[in-house]
Every structure is written in C-alpha cells, then in structure tokens.
Amino acid sequence: MTNMVWKRDEIESPCVQICVVHPTERICTGCYRTLDEISRWSKMDGTERAAIMDELPSRKPRLAKRRGGRAARLDR
C-alpha cells in the first residue's frame, strides 16, 4: 500500500503569522490583506486568490513607518 496524501490544488495563504491590522490603512501588516480578504480566503476560488496575491506587493508602501512618539517631538 502506498502512502497517499490528499493535497488541495490551490493558492496557499500569504499569512506570515504577524497578524496586526494597521490602524488607518486597515490592512494586515504581515500579509497586506484586508480583514475581508482574510475572513473570506478559504471560500475564494483560485482566480480571486491569484488576483489578490498579485496585488499584495503594491500595498506594502502604504505601511511606510511613521515617526511618532518621543522621536517625532524631538525633531521640532
């Protein structure tokens, strides 16, 4: 008997286990998906997942680091 493992032929989640939603952009700082995309991921078909995966790299610049707190006040 062979050891057969059933595998799904689908695009895997881009999740990197850093699940923090940016307060103004409303996208995850780890994978760059919206909350809606994260919640619907398992229900999406391959075409929809592929379209989102193609778009994710363009979202990264939206999360440019801000200088806040004490460091920002010292620049004045």
Image: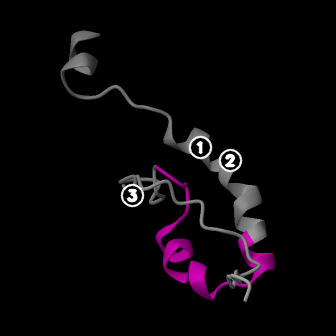
Task: Confirm or deny contact between disc 2 and disc 1 (CB under 8 A).
Answer: yes
User: Which residue lies under the disc numbered 3?
Assistant: 19
Which of the numbered marks, if any, corresponds to residue 57? 2
Chief SS of the magenta region: helix
Question: What residue is shown at x 77% (from left), y 79% (from top)?
Answer: 9
Disc 3 residue type (three-letter):
Cys
Q: Position of residue 7 (x, y in %)?
A: 70, 80
Residue 11 shows in this picture: yes
Q: Tell me which amino acid carries mark 2.
A: Pro
Q: Residue furthest front?
A: 1
State which quadrant residue 69 falls in. Answer: top left
Which residues lie in the magenta part? 30-49
Task: State the residue at coordinates (74%, 76%).
Answer: 10
Question: How far is the residue under mark 2 from the one under mark 1?
Answer: 6 Å
Q: Where residue 70 sits: x, y (%)?
A: 18, 21
Say which amino acid is labelled 1. Answer: Lys
Q: Earlier in the sequence, mark 3 or mark 2?
A: 3
Using a 10 Å C-alpha cutoff, classify the residue at mark 2 as few (fewer than 14 neighbours), some (14 to 19) or many (20 or more): few
Give whichever of 45, 73 is nearer the camera. Answer: 45
**Residues under labels 3 and 2: Cα distance?**
17 Å
Give the x, y percent position of residue 28. Answer: 46, 57
Q: Secondary structure at mark 2?
A: helix
Q: Is residue 76 visible?
A: no
Horizontal and vertical percent position of residue 51: 77, 67
Query: Which of the two discs, 3 and 2, sits closer to the camera?
Result: 3
Is residue 46 a member of the stretch shown in magenta? Answer: yes
Q: Which residue is mark 1?
A: 60
Q: Quarter holding the C terminus?
A: top left
